[in-house]
Image (cartoon, rainbow, N blue to C red):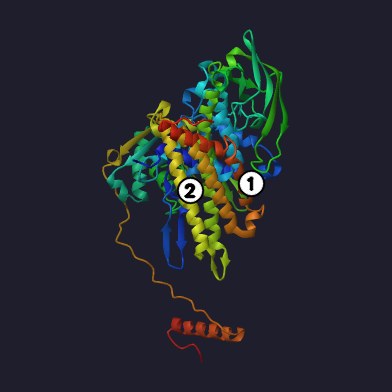
């Protein structure tokens, strides 16, 4: 076993950390306060190739694999959850669906400009009646000749308000259900029949766009069917596996930041005549946080290695997302406790991190769904198929 | 135009803690960064390349533990780099390093311009630039904020008096850049991955040479005769009591110390 990062991944982390500290950190509080997507940062990420970090170089990517992508998400998550979320929705699920199941023409037309940041992506799955029950979607696609016409809509779509390219699921055969009756499509946001109905005003990740999308007789050409007709649900579940791993990596960054803030504060804050680092209650909190962070780090990068070496990872990706989001929430909560009243002040990043952390337990499949995924995989290995 | 840029690395100060009370330095994290002034020299070279076209070649400022700095230079945009190794190089002082670098420049068919940092974060001697100029017999411009080369001349902006002055020198020349003068660009992601993997059009961009192939002998001017530390400073004293008592104690201690310094009793 070798737990060291390769020289290229070490160099990549150095580059990303410098980028995050120079370009993202100065605007992290501002975009949260102003509820603003950091488009400039997103474009700069594209210019240096980071929006294509995991895609092969033949598609305009960097070719750094899932390991490189996890490093990107960890470093962004350490500085700004909103920026990590924008990037995660763009690469990890939006563009990823095209990479995983798109044909060569689709990759040429869509993946290349997404990898360079010339265009932005979103992933349209959730509907008002289909959240955790993702197969219960109502958006309908009907074929007429070499076109499909979509009617319906999506809610809570990250990047939805500004994405140029959106991958969506629609029912193409109601008689067949999720396996056979649902198809994935690639949409462009400037097509007639596509509109953004509203933007959510959220508690956390306020530097992101979370939008409701409406499809009203939206014509999609046949060549924009993503994968095979009837197999869209599988495409989307595969994309979510990738997204869940890297969401875990972003949570790792957030949790590590909580440890770092707590240690710095404990070194300087004096109570009862000594720095609070000397208080056992604070030591125990920091020890617990740091231990969970290290366990999460091992999990995230082991799964990244599994992806890059072509192994199956669905169950472990669900663990990354579930455990990562809960470790981040606990660590940030403890960091706030260590900082006392100051933790609630907007002069410090902890209150923002506290608000931002909560969504990670919900999006890309709630943690309850992750537990179902994990348990059903375990039981399947023991010959039992769990019924939904 | 051919520009040589001489760069090195240093322990990241962010990972170092100085405990003055215990008189010790703790290296908590052994991360290395490019020497800040050398980063500026590299960026200056790349800007000249962008503006007028140039081949940028990176060389190390002395022995480096590995070729990482050379790969960083190519990732940022240098066309090629030569990593220099050899046991003899480990004992090299600035004079010997200069000899080796001058030989490397000659082996690589010469340069029009040599750029490097004006100082280093660790040794801080600032000798390399002037020594390179002397070794090559070229003019030197030290401590520049900006540099641009065109038509056989190099122009540099320096701090002079209360403002800035622009100076010019004929090429070939040596220019040193101040730390913080320029912000080094981010490398292109795919290029960075390729240079570390040794793939694509930068697969052959980093070469490794043994210094023994360049010079007959590495001959430092300095001789190391061991390590010695200055005598421990006498500790101060803490005085308590009323302001008058504290002032009296402090004055008494000062007088006692003055008496020791003079070697006789100064209190009459």
Numbered circles on residues, count: 2
Chain that bears disc 1: A
Disc 1 marks which residue? A355
Q: Position of residue A363 (x, y in %)?
A: 59, 36
**Front-most of residues B130 and A362:** A362
Left or right of B252? Residue A157 is right
The answer to whether residue B2 of the structure is visible from this angle is no
Classed neighbour count for the residue bearing mark 2: other residues with Cα under 10 Å, few (<14), some (14–19), many (≥20):
many
- Give above or below for A268 relative to A100: below
Find numbered disc 2 in the image and state the secondary structure of the residue it sits on: helix
Q: Position of residue A305 (x, y in %)?
A: 41, 35
Question: Which dot marks residue B249?
Answer: none
Q: Position of residue A371 (x, y in %)?
A: 51, 38
**Front-most of residues A24 and B263:** A24
Chain that bears disc 2: A
Identify which residue is drawn at 56% across, 15% down. Answer: A229
- Give above or below for A151 relative to B219: above
Q: For residue A181, what is the image quadrant?
A: top right
Classed neighbour count for the residue bearing mark 1: other residues with Cα under 10 Å, few (<14), some (14–19), many (≥20):
some
Q: For residue B245, what is the image quadrant?
A: bottom right
- Give above or below for B69 relative to A225: below
Extreme-right residue of the structure: A197
Tags 2 and 1 touching, CB below 8 Å: no
Disc 2 marks which residue? A293
**Front-most of residues A309 and B81:** A309
To the question of a shared chain for discs 2 and 1, the answer is: yes
Left or right of B5? Residue B83 is left
Left or right of B57? Residue A348 is right
């Amino acid at each position: 076993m070798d737990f060291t990062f390769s020289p290229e991944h070490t160099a990549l982390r150095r580059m990303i950390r410098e980028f995050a500290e120079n370009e993202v950190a100065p605007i992290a509080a501002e975009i949260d306060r102003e509820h603003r997507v950091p488009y400039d940062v997103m474009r700069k990420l594209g210019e240096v190739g980071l929006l294509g970090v995991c895609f092969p170089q033949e598609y305009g990517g960097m070719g750094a694999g899932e390991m490189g992508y996890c490093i990107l998400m960890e470093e962004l998550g350490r500085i700004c959850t909103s920026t990590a979320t924008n990037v995660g929705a763009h690469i990890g699920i939006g563009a990823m669906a095209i990479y995983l199941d798109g044909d060569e023409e689709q990759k040429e037309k869509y993946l290349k400009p997404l990898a360079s940041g010339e265009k932005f992506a979103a992933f349209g799955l959730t509907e008002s009646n289909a959240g955790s029950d993702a197969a219960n979607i109502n958006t309908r696609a009907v074929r007429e000749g070499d076109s499909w016409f979509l009617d319906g809509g999506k809610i809570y779509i990250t990047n939805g308000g500004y994405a140029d390219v959106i991958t969506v699921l629609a029912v193409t055969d109601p008689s067949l259900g999720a396996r056979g009756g649902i198809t994935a499509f690639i949409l462009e946001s400037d097509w007639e029949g596509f509109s953004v109905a509203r933007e959510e005003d959220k508690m956390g990740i306020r530097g992101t766009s979370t939008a409701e999308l409406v499809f009203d007789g939206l014509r999609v050409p046949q060549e924009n069917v993503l994968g095979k007709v009837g197999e869209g649900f599988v495409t989307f579940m595969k994309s979510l596996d990738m997204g869940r791993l890297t969401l875990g990596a972003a949570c790792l960054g957030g949790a590590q930041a909580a440890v770092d803030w707590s240690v710095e504060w404990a070194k300087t804050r004096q109570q009862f005549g000594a720095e609070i680092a000397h208080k056992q209650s604070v030591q125990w909190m920091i020890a617990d946080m740091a231990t969970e962070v290290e366990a999460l780090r091992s999990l995230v990068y082991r799964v990244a290695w599994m992806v890059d070496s072509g192994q199956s990872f669905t169950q472990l990706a669900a663990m990354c997302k579930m455990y990562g989001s809960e470790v981040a929430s606990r660590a940030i909560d403890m960091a706030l406790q260590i900082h006392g009243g100051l933790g609630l002040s907007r002069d410090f990043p902890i209150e923002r991190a506290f608000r931002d952390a909560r969504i990670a337990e919900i999006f890309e499949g709630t943690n309850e769904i992750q537990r179902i995924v994990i348990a059903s995989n375990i039981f399947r290995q023991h010959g039992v198929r769990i019924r939904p | 135009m051919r520009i040589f840029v001489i760069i090195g690395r240093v322990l990241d100060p962010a990972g170092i803690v100085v405990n003055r009370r215990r008189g010790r330095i703790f290296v908590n994290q052994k991360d290395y960064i490019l020497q800040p002034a050398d980063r500026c020299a590299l960026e200056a070279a790349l800007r000249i390349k962008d503006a007028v076209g140039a081949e940028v070649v990176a060389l190390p400022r002395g022995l480096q533990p590995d070729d990482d700095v050379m790969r960083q230079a190519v990732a940022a945009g240098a066309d090629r780099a030569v990593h220099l190794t050899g046991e003899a190089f480990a004992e090299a002082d600035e004079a010997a390093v200069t000899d080796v670098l001058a030989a490397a420049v000659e082996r690589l068919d010469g340069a029009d311009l040599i750029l490097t940092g004006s100082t280093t974060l660790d040794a801080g001697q600032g000798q390399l630039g002037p020594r390179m100029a002397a070794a090559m017999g070229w003019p030197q411009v030290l401590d520049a904020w900006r540099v641009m080369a065109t038509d056989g001349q190099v122009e540099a902006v320096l701090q002079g008096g209360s403002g800035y002055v622009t100076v010019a020198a004929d090429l070939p020349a040596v220019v040193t850049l101040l730390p913080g003068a320029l912000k080094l660009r981010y490398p292109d992601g795919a290029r960075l991955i390729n240079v570390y993997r040794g793939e694509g059009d930068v697969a052959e961009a980093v070469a490794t040479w043994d210094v023994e192939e360049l010079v007959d002998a590495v001959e430092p001017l300095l001789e190391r005769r061991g390590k010695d530390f200055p005598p421990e400073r006498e500790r101060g004293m803490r005085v308590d009591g009323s302001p008058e008592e504290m002032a009296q104690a402090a004055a008494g201690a000062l007088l006692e110390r003055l008496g020791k310094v003079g070697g006789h009793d100064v209190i009459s």
